[in-house]
Image (cartoon, coloured by chain):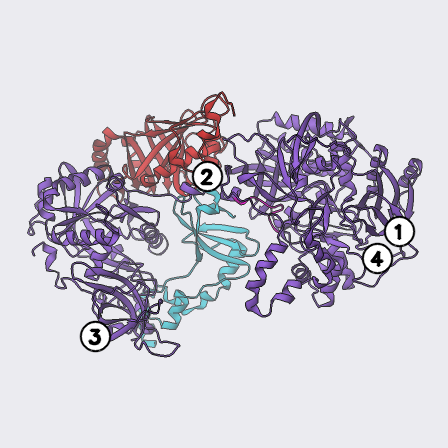
Chain colours: A cyan, B red, C purple
Amino acid sequence: MLEINCPYCGLRDEEEFACGGEAHIARPLVDNPISDKDFADYLFYRDNPKGVFLERWRHSAGCRRWFNVVRDTVSHHILEVYPIDTKPSTKAGRAAYQASWRRQSPAEAAARKVPQKTRKTSISKR
Amino acid sequence: MASSNSENTRDSVPNAQSPQASALPEILPNPEGGAAGLSIAKVTGKTLINLRCDDKIKAKLETLFGAALPTQPNKVAIIGTRRALWLGPDETLLMIEEEQEAEFMLNLRAVLGNAHYAATPVSDAIKIFRLGGARQLDVLAKGCALDLHPASFKEGDCAQSMLSHAAITLAADSQDSLLLFCRTSYSDYVTSWLKDAAVEYGYILLDNA
Amino acid sequence: MARKKTMQTNRNNQQAVSIDSHAPISFTFDGRTYQGCKGDTLASALLANNVHLTGRSFKYHRPRGIMAAGAEEPNALVGVGVGGRVEPNVKATQIELYDGLVAVSQNRFPSLKLDIGEINSVFSRFFPAGFYYKTFMWPASFWMRYEHIIRRAAGLGKVGDTHEDPDRYEKRHAHFDIVVVGGGLSGLSAALQAANSGQRVLLSEDQHQWGGWLRSCDDIIIDDMAGHEWADKTIAQLAEMDNVTLLPRTTCFGYGDHNFLTLAERVTDHLAEKPAHLPRMRLWKVRARRVILATGAIERPLVFAGNDLPGVMLASAAQTYLNQYGVLAGRRGILTTNNDAAWHSAFALHKAGCLITAIVDTRTNPAPAVLKQAASLGIQTRLGAGIIAAHGRLHVARVEIASLTKTGDALAGEAEHFDCDLVLMSGGMNPVVHLHSQSRGKLKWDERTHCFRPSTTHEDEQCVGACNGSFEPERGVKEAIAAALKAVKANGGAADALNLPDIVATKINWAPMPIWQIPNGLPAGQGGKAFVDFQNDVTASDIQLAVREGYHSVEHVKRYTTTGMATDQGKTSNINALGILARERNAEIPAVGTTTFRMPYTPTSIGMIAGRDIGGLFDPVRTTPMDKWHREAGAKFEHVGQWRRAWYYPQNGESMEQAVSREVRAARQTAGLLDASTLGKIDIKGPDAAEFLNRIYTNSWLKLGVGKCRYGLMCKDDGMVMDDGVTTRLAEDHFHMTTTTGGAAGVLDWLEEWLQTEWPELKVYLTSVTEQWAVATLSGPAAKEILNAAGTDINLNDEGFGFMSMREGYISGLPARIYRISFTGELSYEINVPARYGMALWTTLMRAGKNFGITPYGTEAMHVLRGEKGFIIVGQETDGTVTPHDLAMSWIVSDKKSDFIGKRALARHSMKAGDRKQLVGLKTKDPKKVIPEGAHATLDPNQPPPVEMLGHVTSSYFSPNLGHSVAMALLRGGHARMGQTVYFPMLDSSPPIEATITDTSFYDPKGERLNGKL
């Protein structure tokens, strides 16, 4: 049974939490065209690495807040807990974030607001 | 068994393998003598308001409430019979006297005007109990994973957690008592559970605290 | 029984440290009454009565006796208790004796001394390693037949005939700064040092008395006290401290992630009278900031033919029985060993009156000190020799001793025979690294002491003393104190270092000779059985055979031979098995590796794990404010999630069908009343509330007028329907959402998730108000009259209060919000009042409606009524693979909105496939036939298998209002199949049910009844 450091409530038993799976999966914006195949990366594909993993957790029986966790899926050690809208700051967490195939995925690109000027051209290119 | 203390016989303790907790009596004396280890008192006559707002809005309510609303996690503001429990970074549970509800809500609306907040009456959705007794922490430990040791959970602290299968909020209150909040529909379960868990130490159910 | 009690013939010291001979105790074993003393274990009391034979072995039914004195006992497993308290497979060494204890031996028929199953032993060459795998894998279908026979023959103990367990079991959480496991010399030292810091300390001990080996030995003096006196003094000191929790009779059996320990406390097992208020056992779920393991060491057996005979015992165990319980396990003993330490056990027994006729050591060079002492006691020695076989039928009577070659691999001389009734064996010490290993700490092989010791840790944990391979007392205490200081400091505390106690102890060389099997001079596999794992009946030959058959990995050998498995977890067998495996593979032990020790360290009671989660407290039952009324009305209930809901209200002996039929008719002819309090309700407030709903639901919400209601479907982002309900605009920035009963918690979490993680910019607050409001749904043509009769200030005329709108006011003085919405297709009001008024509302309406024929209806009638209308229930018509389009509800999916959850997914190419399963209605050819829900549809009932399946029935009822059955089904390409005939083959081989595909609005398709006009 894990002990998880809720960013608000501190160390609590795992039974108070719900795991929300892989973190940092950006939702493509509706205005950005995306193919079915690329959209599937957002919708269906989830990583399950051996080692450092960035996960979302919710303190479901406590303050009900979502937050992110850097967890080693082998050792079960929790290396970092950080707010839901931020990126990891530990070396291991940053490396895992950078190494994810999602960073280069069209789905993640489609989750970024395209500046008005370039947006037209990028759409016309497709 | 010729026991002088009739409460200390198996007859008074329901078959534990199939807890028939609702069949437990209202009072079970401490089997080892002395005061009952747990007292459970229903707290009535209170209005509960679930307040959702940020810290800036909380600050505006200090005068109305009579004390600064907690901005630190898991803290309770205590002023007289009023309590304000931190439930989340933008969620506070206010407990005030029932007869003050109408005026309080009126004033709250006046103070906050068009600000972004939600003050939702939840008095009917939540039941409050006041727990006491020398063994109350031992009873709670049977179903709650929180560290409630007096060194780490003191008057003015609160926490949300699970008591066995029920979600609860606990607040350490005055005179070594604890306030326990649970959903109304779970309150029968919670009291049955507490009684059954207190069979070792004895318990007493009180009507009002 | 008036039978004469037997004498404790082997009890030679009434003043032994762990017993109180002034408190004699009677107990029975296999029906015979014996005497023991307070403080005895069942094992020590049996030995005191010269009872060695305690059971039959698992596979070969060989006679077995008491081999050890603690949790490591592999042989002496017995059944204890009577009636509902019968517990099988308990180690006699861990049963604390009480007056009236009843124990029986196991795995024997008809009796312990004459056992038919022993024939397995004769035919044992037919039961080699992997016997079950080899024999019963083919033909596979035969396994079911074999299994019954094998189970009966191979099981150990039996559970009692009475399944009503009279005991209570408790579980509790606890938090400590420092947890010390093991109450021997090192554990006590660590606990005392840790406790001096004022931090919260837990010290647990498996046995009922503290001190561990200090109670068994007579040659450790601490601060001028006998070891056990120092232990008593130290524990008294600890007991005085408020910050210390002492748990004797408590086995730490599990060590999981993040320093989570599980301990089993035996609270009343040792009491003759079990107080009713106390639990039998208590499961401690402990979160520790730092852990110190002081779990000691276990002596390992030597592997020689006949090493499992009763009367063959670990040397340290014999010494424990002597010093703790004053019991001499034999009169004529022989020690066989590979190390110096065991010599001292032999000396102790010899001095106490057990004639040690020989000490047989595989080494040629024991320490001069022990040789000298043996000589002075007149004990003859055989060096460079070993017991190559032990003989006897139910007890050891004779051993063969022979010289060995220098490496110990072969015999180097003729065997001599010695008579004896006790064989002490010692193959060196194994640190108890189970907990360290469970917590994923690593082990390293110690070349000097030939055992695995802890190396790196995974959790915040330190091993000290014998469990760390530090067998010397001074070293153990030093380690313990250092570890405790380190833990205190790591916790941010401080404590003055304790003075090291003054310890006087016999100097012992703890390095044994590595010898994993004593040869018998015969080719491999021949001669008597030499056991490695006594509990699982695994011999040295089994391991050799496994290697010959190609099982080289230690994990494979473990599973193939079953060594080190099950409840024993390799306590005595592990290293010998590894040693033999390494030898067979010509490898070193570290290269072979070791298997993982799994929890539990010792078997734990299932009752304790269940604790209070049984019977009425197994799962909470949530009730509505009107529950009492339903109960008094004789309602039958159904459980919807944790909610208890009125199912139907039978009257005058009605069947369910009759009652539901009456309720359904009433709701369409007069009025029905439903307790809908369990509906999920969420208060949504904020300037962006409408925008938020617009993104959550598939339809449009921005223009919904204040006071108006709208039905909505919500999808997951994959476009599949997840919930539905009616949401009402209370004010510009304020909405009241309803969800399904089962979806309430999930929907609130879902909405919070999107607000917190995806759209934090939206200014919206959510609050669950499910239980703030009690809801009574009044439905039927007379609904309006009943409300007026009840008395309300709300104008119920259509102009003032149209369909899909909400009004606030009073009903019979009760503050209420009335939503004019309908799940029945009739004129219908969902009346919400603060929950405290729920019962008042219900009784008021029942009274007001009496003259109008008001009829309470339950969830079954609710299902039928909505089935007649073809309204879906999420979770019944949907299963997470169904889109709004599949439900023929494209009308509710806005194509004008820029975004909503599921929008992009619904535009995926595959969503447009014509062969998706789609919701349709079904009308049976025979109007009385009701298709079973779940039945599969096929186009051709005569198609030879495999029959092509179109889909399945999701809802199906007989409609009393229509006079025929109605059903809905999800069928492949269903929307294009209107009018087609489908068949539903039946399991009971009755003819398939024939039905026509229709749309789903069976009753009042134009919705004319919504206004109450007939």
How far is disc 3 from disc 2 in space, using C-alphas?
Answer: 59 Å
Principal SS element in the magenta part?
Answer: loop
- Percent of width and height locating residue C145: 56, 63
Nearer to the camera, B112 or C176: C176
How far is disc 1 from disc 2 in space, using C-alphas?
Answer: 60 Å
**Which numbered dot is residue C979?**
3
Nearest-to-viewer mark from 3 and 2: 3
- Percent of width and height locating residue C191: 65, 33
Q: Share a chain, discs 1 and 2?
A: no
Q: Chain of mark 3?
A: C
Q: Which residues are magenta?
A: C598-606
Numbered disc 2: secondary structure: loop
- Percent of width and height locating residue C1000: 21, 66
Q: Chain of mark 4?
A: C
**Residue carrying label 2:** B144
- The amino acid at mark 1 is Ala
Can residue C283 be seen here? The reply is no
Q: Share a chain, discs 2 and 4?
A: no
Q: Label 1: few (<14), some or many (≥20) within 10 Å?
A: many
Is C664 rendered above or below residue C465?
below
- The amino acid at mark 4 is Pro
Nearest-to-viewer mark from 1 and 2: 1
Numbered disc 3: secondary structure: loop
In the image, residue A124 lies in the stretch drawn in magenta: no
Is A29 rendered above or below residue C36?
below
**Which numbered dot is residue C385?**
1
Q: Chain of mark 2?
A: B
Q: First in sequence: mark 3 or mark 4?
A: 4
**Residue carrying label 4:** C519
- The amino acid at mark 3 is Gly
Is C875 rendered above or below residue C845?
below
Q: Quadrant of the C terminus of chain C?
A: bottom left
